[in-house]
Image (tube, grey):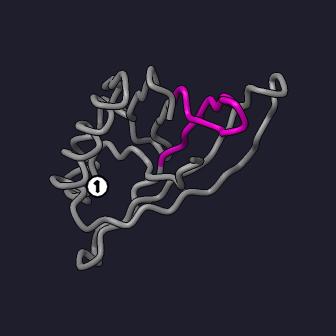
């Protein structure tokens, strides 16, 4: 991740910089997403330049032990930059699918309370 990276979660909350992103994700993963399983799938990679790429994907979050809770799915678009041979995430934008929006996220949380506003955990590119 770049030092000045930015993450926008599906509810539109923004975290800027490594420390803020780490704190935001840490609170989420220790709180409402504790014990959740995140599965990401890359849909497409497009190179804008040899050192800039856009990655589109889909993330599914499920909670073991809550069989009635269906996985919450959202899409993401990441901007990667090549920093001296290492690809780093510069920007993450995640957004809901399947009719789940920021205005009805509370209803989705009632179905699966531990799966709120997920920011995907993707493999590190370091």
Q: Where does label 1 land, which residue?
A: 115
- Residue at 23%, 79% (x, y): give it: 65
Mark 1 crowdedness (10 Å alpha carbons): few <14, some 14-19, many ≥20: many
Which percent across, then down, holds residue 18? 36, 31
- Residue at 80%, 23% (x, y): give it: 48
Which percent across, then down, holds residue 24? 25, 37
Q: Seen in the image, is 100 located left or right of residue 123?
A: left
Location of residue 123 with respect to 24 vertically, above or below = below
Q: Quarter of the image holding residue 6?
A: top left
Q: Nearer the viewer, residue 53 or 9?
A: 53
- Residue at 25%, 56% (x, y): give it: 33
Q: Seen in the image, is 91 located left or right of residue 49?
A: left
Would you say residue 90 sits in the magenta stretch?
yes
Which percent across, then down, holds residue 10? 39, 35
Q: Is label 1 in a helix, a strand or a loop?
A: loop
As drawn, which residue projects farthest toward the left?
Answer: 31
Would you say residue 81 sits in the magenta stretch?
yes
Q: Which residues are magenta?
A: 74-91
Q: Seen in the image, is 88 located left or right of residue 111?
A: right
Location of residue 122 with respect to 68 vertically, above or below = above
Most common secondary structure along the magenta stretch: strand
As drawn, which residue projects farthest toward the front?
Answer: 84
């Amino acid at each position: 991740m770049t030092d000045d990276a930015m993450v926008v979660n599906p509810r539109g909350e923004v975290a800027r910089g490594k420390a803020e992103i780490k704190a935001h994700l840490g609170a989420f993963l220790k709180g409402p997403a504790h014990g959740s399983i995140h599965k990401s799938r890359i849909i497409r990679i497009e190179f804008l330049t040899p050192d800039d790429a856009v990655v589109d994907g889909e993330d599914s979050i499920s909670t073991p032990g809550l069989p009635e809770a269906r996985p919450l799915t959202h899409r993401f678009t990441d901007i990667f930059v090549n920093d001296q041979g290492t690809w780093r995430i510069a920007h993450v934008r995640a957004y809901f699918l399947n009719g789940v929006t920021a205005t009805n996220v509370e209803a989705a949380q009632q179905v699966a309370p531990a799966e709120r506003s997920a920011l995907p955990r993707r493999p590190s590119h370091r």
